[in-house]
Amino acid sequence: MATDDAVGSSPRGPRLGRRGFLGAGALVGAALAGNVTEAEAQPPARRRVQATEGPASGDTDDRYRPVVTPNGSSLPFRWVDGVKVMHLRAEPVDHEFTDGLRAECWGYNGSTPGPTIEAVEGDRLRIYVTNGLQEQTTVHWHGILLEAGMDGVGGLTQPPIEPGETYRYEFTVGEPGTFMYHPHWDEMTQMAMGMMGMFVVHPRRPSGFVPDRDFAIILNEWSVPIGAARPDPFEMSDFNVLTMNSKVFPATDALVAKLDDRVRIRFGNLSGIDNHPIHLHGYSFRIAGSDGGAYPPSAQQPHTTVLVPTGSCRWVEFEANAPGDWAMHCHMTHHVMNQMGHGIPNMVGVRGGRDFDRRLRRLVPGYMPMGRNGMGSMGEHDMPIPANSIPMRGGPGAFGRIDMGGMFTIVKVREGLTDYADPGWYEHPEGTVARVATEAELRADGIDLS
Ligand SMILES: [Cu+2]
């Protein structure tokens, strides 16, 4: 078991180490020794972690405030002689992108993305990777500086992990920051199927901007043909499901903060092709670092949109001093559409009428007169849609329907919160909401509508 010396500067290590004997880590160890079934050894099912709290089971580590992974969780761990031991299992997962769209994806420990790995600068980590897929895999620790033989590139730094095998990675994490993990074997297929996760290294001695809320979101893009049971990893450019932590709006959990909380949002992007400019309403944030490390203060420019190139991380920081429900979304307009908004005939601006529709239907069987006046209300149409598919647009909002889907979520900032559960819609102070102009107002301001 852990000793004071072995856990180094972790004051909690020894106590937590003993407690951890009852945790998931013990089961993992036993499973590796063949003492329990695989099912018993599985970490607990993925669950939502909205409040600031630790992993679902195993040891806890109060040297840092845990990251909140919206719609996700952190990876359980166990201290063994001063080493933080974790277990990833690559496997198929039955995944729901939002109500109405499921697919058999691939991930880690029952979820896509896999659980977020959290460690502290200088920690020694031992991460076991069990391959529960039908094909080989590896895990690469993207951005972590380590010995070449632990880098996880199949064929280059290790043989690929065969189905059923468990590999052992061990390394020490250096500088604090925001990193990722993903396969480096059959990359195109395995990442398109959802295999990825965030990897956060906390500072050993926090100083400067110490966040009250520290969120981690990984961006991905998928091709899920209508009615398909699985994503199509062979699609190269035309993606129809754009996700934050493998969810599309309206299933994306809101990011909740108390007024004046210090907020950090860490983004990673492992999309097959695209970069994502993520825009936050209501705030100017500082872009504070990348997967290469923290930016010096003089280089932390103010922005409202942060471009997250594929294969990289960015993190942004701000003080949540403006209450409200603030949209946060990719600014590529096709990336806030859901599955059925792509590849439909362009009818915008077409002047139709009954006879036109009837004649066109003769030429194009099944033609429906839609979208001539624009596409904003398409999500409201009560049209029958195929099984296991989602309409092109959005979900309910405080003022009717929010017409975005895909990479869209809401940052909810409130005064007087006692916890970080979703507080519902913002109640705007009287007179602060845009509304229809009255005739008297138009007249008084000289607006002529004729
Ligand atoms: Cu995008």
Image (tube, grey):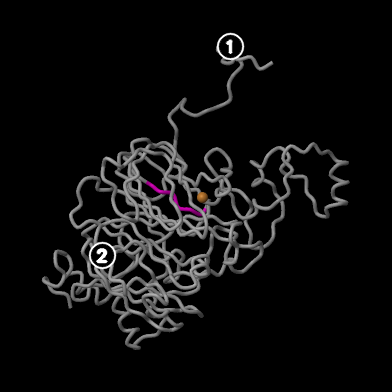
Q: Does the numbered disc 2 mark a residue whose Cβ is under 8 Å from ligand 1?
A: no
Mark 2 surroundings: few (<14), some (14-19) or many (≥20) residues within 10 A = some
* Left or right: 89, with 393 as reference point: left
Q: Quadrant of residue 286?
A: top left
Image quadrant where one finds the C terminus:
top right
* Left or right: 446, with 414 as reference point: right
Q: Quadrant of residue 160?
A: bottom left
Instruction: Tell me which secondary structure the magenta stretch mostly adopts.
Output: loop
Q: Is residue 183 magenta?
A: no
Q: Residue furthest bottom?
A: 34
Q: Which residues are magenta?
A: 251-256
Q: Amino acid at mark 2?
A: Val
* Left or right: 420, with 362 as reference point: left
Image x and y of residue 233, in percent: 57, 67
Tag 2 and tag 1, C-beta contact below 8 Å: no
Residue drawn at (29%, 47%) of the image: 295
The foreground one among 311 and 21 is 311
Q: Which residue is mark 1?
A: 446
Q: Which residue is mark 2?
A: 173
Q: Which mark is residue 52?
A: none
The foreground one among 429 and 294 is 294
Image x and y of residue 367, in percent: 80, 51
